[in-house]
Image: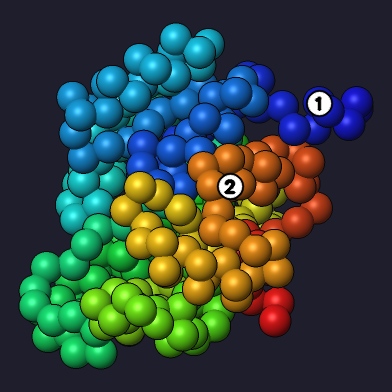
Amino acid sequence: MNTFDLFSLKGKVALITGGRAMYGKGCTVALADAGAKVYLASHSVEAAQDYVNELRANGGDVEAIAFNQRDVKSIDAMVREVVEKEGRIDVFVHCSRIIPKGTGIGWFQDEAQLTDDVNVNSAASLYMTHIVGEQMIKQGSGSIVTFGSMMGLVGVEKHNYDGEPGMGDGAYGHAYALCKSGLTAWVRNAASYYGRYGVRINAVCPGGLESDRTPPIFKKNYSDHTQIGRLANGDDIKGPLLFLASDASAYLTGLSIPVDGGYTCM
């Protein structure tokens, strides 16, 4: 096979959650650019439609479907809808995250917030991967790419927040670190199960993403802690995501790959 063809997703069906914001936006573009039929799962199909239309205008074959990460029935319906329409799911990218309910910031989070965070961002994530995985087992093939975080690989560098003390409290939300560090360990476990069925699962662990809300002081502090010297931009996730989603990574599974400009290699 031609080397470039290994990265192609033509004829493949891809399902993505959280695919219209932050890193997820770049993932959706990568899937569409590579030729996949993309199902963009969103809590609001109406809210997602402008982005879907933008992708279609650029040649993407994209369709929005309803999805509520807090509702198991909604997760089941999401997967069932794609399978009923396409007969298969070749790629599943899970990068959605729900902001937990409850009170507390920084090191303290009340019981309601902790419970909601773990139930939705850990348990529900594993459940939807299980449901998609069952379909992939039937097919005998598939690639799952889930989102960890560099915050699940290393502790917080407090000096990133020098000059921005208000941001520092939020960085110590330990439920987030718990969910993301647990996911990187679970991916290894899942790979040992799915491999016998021809299904692969890997995680990307991104670092900080620059946006119009990034304070200049934090941007400088954080950039100084990376090897490349900057925060990520919207394009930086596209290559790693496409590599893991496509046959270019056919012999890789169980990995949690930092996409962080060298932050965690120090």
Does 233 appear above or below 112? Answer: above
Q: Which residue is denoted by mark 1 in the rendering?
A: 5
Q: Splitting the image into 4 quarters, where does residue 79 fall? A: top left
In the rendered structure, which amino acid carries the disc numbered 1? Asp
Q: Is residue 53 left or right of residue 144?
A: left
Which label sits on residue 237?
A: 2
Q: Splitting the image into 4 quarters, where does residue 107 fall? A: bottom left
Display coloring: rainbow
Q: Splitting the image into 4 quarters, where does residue 215 fall? A: bottom left
Circles 1, 2 touching at the beta carbon (< 8 Å): no
Asked whether residue 143 is in view, the answer is no
Task: Give neighbour class at mark 2: few <14, some 14-19, many 20+ (Cα, 10 Å).
Answer: many
Q: Tell me the residue at 44%/19% (across/down).
A: 55
Q: Is residue 71 left or right of residue 130?
A: left
Which label sits on residue 202?
A: none
Disc 1 from disc 2: Cα separation = 20 Å
In the rendered structure, which amino acid carries the disc numbered 2? Ile
Secondary structure category for the residue under label 2: loop
Q: Tell me the residue at 21%/46% (across/down).
A: 68
The image quadrant where one finds the N terminus is top right
**Mark before the other along the chain sequence, 1 or 2:** 1
Q: Tell me the residue at 64%/25% (across/down).
A: 34
Does 78 appear above or below 216? Answer: above
Asked whether residue 179 is in view, the answer is yes
The image quadrant where one finds the C terminus is bottom right
